[in-house]
Image (cartoon, grey):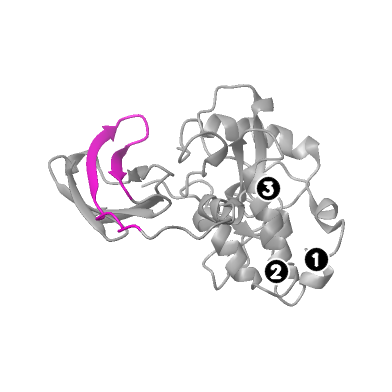
């Protein structure tokens, strides 16, 4: 399994309660990126997630619950800590190669996975990746929403950081879902079900576990061969979960759970 190791000019200064590392990587040093073709984005298009092995997210140690009034809740603060383009442009091209992205660089935003407005690390390679699509995009709406929640005292900074890393798409659908204008009619809920199949991905050295269910916007979790991996289902109940088990696990059975539904697949 590929493990991301920060090669920053300064080592992370600890781990936050939400499990994300702090980083003091310099804004004025071009940070080394992982080798080409090493990273595998999850999902497609505007609703993609970075590879958690390459871009797990990282935090700015100067932003804590005690400092938000002087940092992320102060107008203009994020621009004061944003790295210069002369630094991020070469990083972006190297990151595009790591993610095996062959399109024009203008079609990607070099995105802070934990955004600056939620205390994300400013220039750590574990917090920056080539997000498909230009800004503004759906993730920006979630970032602004969570920043308001934190600055209005409705949510802790730690929880907001964890929410955006775990499943910002699910939160986006929740905050943009239209409010019903009439009372819904009562209909029996369909029985939960799922089906799954698996295929070895030689390019990335992992298993694609394809899950089909009637459980939209729900975590699909695959366990087997001593490994566990999760990814959210889309609005149709479909998910492609990347299980980082070895090719030698061929023939092993894995268990898939999607909400209350359980099904199985053979690697």
Mark nearer the N terminus (2 vs 1): 1
- Kindly tell me whether residue 24 is visible in this rendering: no
Q: Check contact, mark 1 vs mark 3: CB within 8 A.
A: no
- Looking at marks 1 and 3 on the same chain, the residue that comes earlier in the sequence is marked by 1
Residue 73, numbered label: 1
Q: Secondary structure at mark 3?
A: helix
Q: Position of residue 56 (x, y in %)?
A: 52, 53
Whether residues under marks 3 and 2 lie with C-beta atoms below 8 angstroms apart, the answer is: no
Residue shown at the point (60%, 62%) measured from the top left: 161
Question: Which residue position is annotated with label 2?
Answer: 150
> Nearest the camera: 7 or 176?
176
What secondary structure is marked by label 2? helix
The numbered mark, 3 or 2, whose residue comes first in the sequence reads 3
Q: Residue 234: percent from the left, percent from the top?
A: 43, 44
Q: Is residue 110 visible?
A: yes
Judge left or right: residue 66 versus residue 126: right
Classify the position of the C terminus by image quarter: top left
Write the residue at 46% across / 58% down.
Answer: 184
Which is more toward the observer, 153 or 247?
A: 153
Q: Residue at x 20, y 51 (%)?
A: 263
| Residue sitting at x 58%, y 56% | 181
Question: Can you give x and y, in whole percent of width and height, for residue 246 in the image?
Answer: 25, 43
Query: Given this view, does label 1 or label 3 mark the residue nearer the observer?
Result: 3
User: Under tag 1, what secondary structure?
Assistant: loop
The residue that mark 3 highlights is: 140
Q: CA distance from mark 2 to mark 1?
A: 8 Å
Within 10 Å of disc 2 (Cα), the crowding (few <14, some 14-19, many 20+) is many
Front-most of 234 and 254?
234
Decide: marks 2, 1 in contact (CB < 8 A)? yes
Residue range of the region highlighted in magenta in the rendering: 187-214
Does 194 appear in magenta? yes
Quarter of the image holding residue 11? bottom right
């Amino acid at each position: 399994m590929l493990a991301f190791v920060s090669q920053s000019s300064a080592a992370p200064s600890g781990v936050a309660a939400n499990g994300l590392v702090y980083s003091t990587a310099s804004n004025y040093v071009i940070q080394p990126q992982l080798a080409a073709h090493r990273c595998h984005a999850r999902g497609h298009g505007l609703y993609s997630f970075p590879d958690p092995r390459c871009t797990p997210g990282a935090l700015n140690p100067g932003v804590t619950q005690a400092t938000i009034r002087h940092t992320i809740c102060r107008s203009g603060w994020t621009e004061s800590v944003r790295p210069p383009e002369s630094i991020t442009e070469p990083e972006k091209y190297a990151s595009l190669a790591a993610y095996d992205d062959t399109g024009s660089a203008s079609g990607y935003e070099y995105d802070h996975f934990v955004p600056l407005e939620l205390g994300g690390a400013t220039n750590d390679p574990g917090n920056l990746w080539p997000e498909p699509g230009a800004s503004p995009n759906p993730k920006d709406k979630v970032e602004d929403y969570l920043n308001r929640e934190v600055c209005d005292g409705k949510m802790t900074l730690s929880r907001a950081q964890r929410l955006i890393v775990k499943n910002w798409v699910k939160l986006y659908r929740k905050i943009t879902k239209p409010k019903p204008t009439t009372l819904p009619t009562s209909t029996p809920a369909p029985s939960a079900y799922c089906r799954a199949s698996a295929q070895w991905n030689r390019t990335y050295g992992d298993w694609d576990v394809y899950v089909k269910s009637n459980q939209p916007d729900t975590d699909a979790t695959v366990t087997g061969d001593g490994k566990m991996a999760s990814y959210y289902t889309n609005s149709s109940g479909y998910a492609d979960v990347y299980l980082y088990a070895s090719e030698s696990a061929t023939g092993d059975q894995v268990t898939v759970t999607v909400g209350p539904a359980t099904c199985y697949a053979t690697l």
